[in-house]
Structures are given as structure tokens and as C-alpha cells.
Image (cartoon, rainbow, N blue to C red):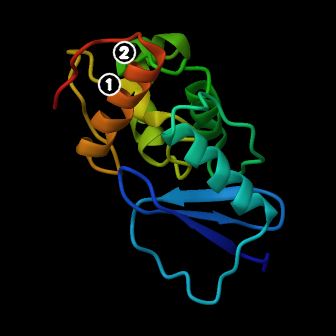
């Protein structure tokens, strides 16, 4: 079994736990998770630094080694999520069209929900077709905060999104 490391970052939306192996960030979660016995490594420290910069408004994209387990389909969805520009949103319908798979909108939404790399892979930028906030594993109030933060920093995007 690979070594596991963890860094905890305090943020405006609560404590984030960043997990990594020797080479890759594997998970970022808002949930209280057992971390006793886990130490930091260069990968978790770098992720912590970049997330802190994001919350300070100094970073709009991430340059981190990441890896999470998932099907080929999920990996495709997660790779496409990274292309959604900071400060913008896209509906699930638009996103499924972008993936050339409109009929798979529910599967795409499910893959979005299985993303374990919160913020780094910006699943929070996908919203409902009616412009409302829908589904976010980190709770909708965090999704709202992240979108408001990005809109404020980038000076673009919708002015009000509500759930």
C-alpha cells in the first residue's frame, strides 16, 4: 500500500483535508476525516499553498500532480471540468454538449459528483440548466461562496446565483 500524507488548510469555507501519496494529490475534502498518524509531504504542502493562494485571490488555476481513481468516463469528465474558466459557470446541458454526449447528462452529473479533488477540479462551476445551484458534495453554501469568490476576483460571471 502506498504511503499516505495529509495537510489541513483553514479556509473561509471551513477546514480542508488534503490527502496525497508520495507523488500525487488524491483527495481534498471538507469532511472531518481521520488524519492521526498522517504527516505532510511536499505534495500536500504544495497543494495547501496553492489552495491558500486561491482563497486569497492570488491564484486562478492550479499546477499540481493529481490522480484519483475512476472509470475512463469519469476521467474524461474530470479532465473536461478543468477547462471551465475561472469565474465562469456552465450548465450540465452545456457541459454534456461540450463532451459531445447530451444523452449522458445524468451520467456526467454523477461523475461530477464523484470528483474527489474539490476546487482543484472545479466541479463547483457546473450549475443547473435553469441557472440555479444544484448538487455539491461540499454543500450548496460552499458552492455559492466559491462562485461568488471567483466572480469577485475575476470581475466576470453571473451576478447572482442562488440555490
Q: Is residue 98 visible?
A: yes
Q: Quadrant of the C terminus?
A: top left
Residue 115 drawn at (x, y percent): 51, 46
The residue closer to the viewer here, 46 or 71, is 46
Q: Which residue is mark 2?
A: 93
Which quadrant: the N terminus?
A: bottom right
Q: Position of residue 147 (x, y in %)?
A: 36, 28
Residue, far right = 23
**Above or below — where is 111 with respect to 58?**
below
Residue 141 drawn at (x, y percent): 24, 43
Q: Which residue is mark 1?
A: 127
Where disc 2 sits, the SS reads helix
Disc 1 crowd rating (10 Å Cα; few below 14, some 14-19, many 20+) is many
Element at label 1? strand
Q: Position of residue 145 (x, y in %)?
A: 31, 37
Marks 2 and 1 sit apart, C-alpha to C-alpha, by: 9 Å
Would residue 106 be seen by someone viewing this image from the given angle?
no
Amino acid at each position: 500500500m502506498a504511503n499516505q500524507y495529509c495537510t489541513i488548510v483553514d479556509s473561509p469555507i471551513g477546514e480542508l483535508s488534503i490527502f496525497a501519496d508520495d507523488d500525487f494529490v488524491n483527495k481534498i475534502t471538507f469532511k472531518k476525516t481521520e488524519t492521526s498518524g498522517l504527516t505532510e509531504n511536499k505534495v500536500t504542502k504544495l497543494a495547501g499553498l496553492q489552495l491558500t493562494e486561491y482563497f486569497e485571490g492570488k491564484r486562478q488555476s492550479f499546477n499540481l500532480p493529481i490522480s484519483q481513481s475512476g472509470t475512463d468516463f469519469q476521467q474524461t469528465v474530470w479532465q473536461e471540468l478543468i477547462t471551465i474558466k475561472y469565474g465562469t459557470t456552465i450548465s450540465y446541458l452545456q457541459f454534456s454538449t461540450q463532451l459531445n454526449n447530451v444523452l449522458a447528462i445524468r451520467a456526467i452529473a454523477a461523475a461530477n459528483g464523484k470528483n474527489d479533488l474539490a476546487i482543484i477540479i472545479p466541479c463547483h462551476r457546473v450549475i443547473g440548466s435553469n441557472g440555479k445551484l444544484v448538487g455539491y458534495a461540499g454543500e450548496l453554501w460552499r458552492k455559492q461562496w466559491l462562485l461568488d469568490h471567483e466572480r469577485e476576483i475575476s470581475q466576470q460571471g453571473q451576478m447572482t446565483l442562488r440555490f
